[in-house]
Image (cartoon, grey):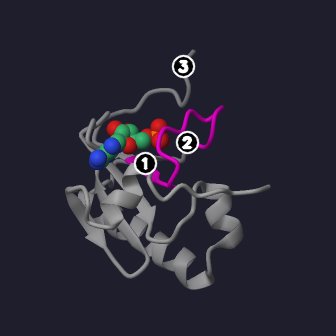
């Protein structure tokens, strides 16, 4: 699989500071910020700082430090947002996953009952 990364995507621009974001948490390897069009009371995107276009790209090529740093950011977002009642983590990927932004991001959705996983 050839994971071609386009550094003109909107999340790359956020990482370069070219576009503002509502940061929830940041560490050396990840940035978490509020989704511009929230679909739940809590809707945070966690992205790696490295150039990875998808979850499978990140899982294959990111270093152990990057992967640990990313998951620590997920843990911090869950703690900060108070998701004791539960949450959903979603990684839309490529065409069939209806991924709009080609920089890996994990949606963290919470704050209400999110219903069935998929609807047709
Ligand atoms: P996906 O379909 O998984 O690629 O979702 C991309 C998400 O990025 C959508 O939920 C958008 O609302 C969100 N989004 C797009 N532009 C921005 C932005 N500038 N700041 C925060 N969220 C954004």
Q: Is residue 86 left or right of residue 22?
A: right
Instruction: Choose the circle earlier in sequence order: 1 or 2.
Output: 2
User: From which residue to which does the magenta span run?
Assistant: 92-108
Q: CA distance from mark 3 to mark 2?
A: 15 Å
User: Looking at the rendering, in which quadrant would you find the N terminus?
Assistant: bottom right
Say whether residue 93 is magenta.
yes
For the residue with label 1, is its CB less than 8 Å from the closest atom of ligand 1? yes
Quadrant of the rendered image containing residue 42: top left
Which residue is pictured at 41% across the width and 60% down the height? 12
Looking at the rendered image, the disc whose residue lies closer to the viewer, 1 or 3, is 1
Q: Which residue is mark 3?
A: 119
Q: Residues within 10 Å of mark 1 (few under 14, many from 20)?
A: many
Say whether residue 109 is magenta.
no
Which residue is pictured at 31% across the width and 59% down the height? 14
What SS does tag 1 mark? strand
Q: Position of residue 26 (x, y in %)?
A: 30, 73
Q: Quadrant of ligand 1?
A: top left
For the residue with label 2, is its CB less than 8 Å from the closest atom of ligand 1? yes
Q: Nearer the viewer, residue 78 or 54?
A: 54
Q: Is residue 13 left or right of residue 105?
A: left
Instruction: Choose the circle earlier in sequence order: 3 or 2.
Output: 2
Instruction: Choose the circle earlier in sequence order: 1 or 3.
Output: 1
Residue 92 is tagged as: 2
Q: Is residue 1 above or below residue 42?
A: below
What SS does tag 2 mark? loop
Q: Which residue is mark 1?
A: 107
Which residue is pictured at 33% across the width and 55% down the height? 84
């Amino acid at each position: 699989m050839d994971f071609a990364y386009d550094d003109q995507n909107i999340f790359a621009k956020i990482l370069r500071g070219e576009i503002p974001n509502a940061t929830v948490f940041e560490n050396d390897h990840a940035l978490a910020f509020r989704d511009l069009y929230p679909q739940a009371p809590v809707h945070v995107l966690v992205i790696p700082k490295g150039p990875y276009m998808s979850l499978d790209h990140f899982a294959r090529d990111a270093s152990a430090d990057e992967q640990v740093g990313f998951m620590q950011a997920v843990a911090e977002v869950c703690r900060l947002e108070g998701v004791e009642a539960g949450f959903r983590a979603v990684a839309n990927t490529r065409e069939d996953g209806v991924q709009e932004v080609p920089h890996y991001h994990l949606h963290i959705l919470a704050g209400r009952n999110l219903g069935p996983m998929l609807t047709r």
